[in-house]
Amino acid sequence: MIIKPSSVNSMAFWGKRLLSYAKTGIEHCHGKTQERRLIQTNISVFIAVITILVFNLAFVLLGNPGLMYSGLVQLPFLLLLPLVLWFNRKGRRHEATLTLFLLVMLDAVSALMLAQGVTLGLQYYFLMFAVLPASYLDAKHWPTTLLLFLSNILLFGYFEVYGWQAHPSIAEVPTFTITLLRIIMVGSCATTVLVVILISEYYAAQNEQELQYLADTDSLTGLPNRRAFMGRLERTIKDRRSFSLLIIDVDHFKQINDTTGHQTGDAALQFLANQLNACIQGEDFAGRIGGEEFAMVQFCASPLEHLVRAESLRKTIASAHPDLGVGPVYLTVSIGVCMATPPVSLITLMAMADNALYEAKRSGRNCVQVAAAKSESVPPWQAVT
């Protein structure tokens, strides 16, 4: 089967339009939870519209007067559903959600009492209407949630216990057709609940990713913080791969802060972070592990390449003279490099890289010093497991 480009473009167009409508009023939301609830409300409008239209079409095709009258009774509520989107567009999310549930409840009550009775199982919608408000409404609106829950439970209980007489002509509908319509009706309930669950799961995953990012990221530089960097370094050691660990310290950073201000010092750290990001290759990674101290792991083909890349980074920073808001600043770094050959412990690796950094400081700063962490028998209490 060949799909024409025009068909693909049309699908993409309507997909974007649907997404746009689903996000109606999102600019008024504060946080992902409010976004989720707003999108659930808007999508529920589309589900309600589609459900009413599908059943109306089915009733017309069946040609049964009672069923067609049932569909006709639902049309006013269909026409009022866009009010929900209007409320959300105005930033009135609570009114939008309340309007949605009142309309679908009145729609179900009207169709059941004026035409369908309990023949098609319309009363089961009230169970869905009872539980969904808890996912749609903010916690502060718990009285509304409770009222909707109790109202719908009472409606379901009444119609389930006492029943309700359907339009006489509905008795003429074949049993198989009635069963099929009941299945479709229950299926529409299940579809609505599924959509709500999927939206909730999507936003839960997004929230988790954002929290993980905040927990792992240094807010000033955007680099991984010490905890995240050390965790990845431990995993790298566990993989038993050869690499080099660079510990990079800004020279005379206290003097920069004292003479030009902490804002300039922050800008210097951000500049250095950008330089580290620029020299990352392949699986390399970097992080901020202290105040003015950074670390980087490099994977190179040879020991000479480790040294060449570290020296290139030092020269790039020293020759940059970045303008940090107070004119050009002469910024240099000292770098301690430890070349690791597995197996090696994290404690040994960090100690040797630190020693190389201190040696660079003692040698006059603005230089690179190298140490080699040779393969060792790692004690159990130092092993990365």
Image (cartoon, grey):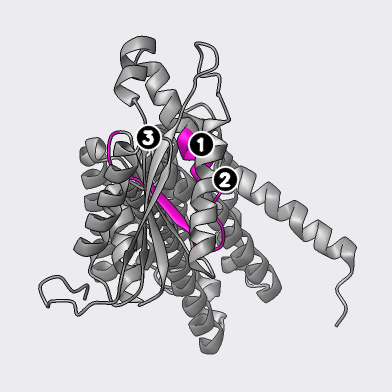
Residue drawn 63% across the image and 44% down it: 20
Q: Which residue is mark 1?
A: 26
Q: Nearer the viewer, mark 2 or mark 1?
A: 2
Q: Which range is magenta?
A: 272-291
Give whichever of 132, 38 is nearer the camera: 38
> Residue 267, position in %: x, y?
45, 24
Amino acid type shown at disc 3: Arg
Q: CB of mark 2 within 8 Å of CB of mark 1?
A: no
Left or right: residue 178 compared with residue 11: left
Q: Nearer the viewer, mark 3 or mark 1?
A: 3
Precedes in sequence: disc 2 or disc 1? 1
Residue 281 visible in the snapshot: yes
Measure how far apart labels 2 and 1 are at the Cα level: 36 Å
Residue 283 highlighted magenta (yes or no):
yes
| The quarter of the displayed image where residue 348 is located | bottom left
Residue drawn 27% across the image and 39% down it: 290
Q: Which residue is mark 3?
A: 365
Q: Which residue is mark 2?
A: 278
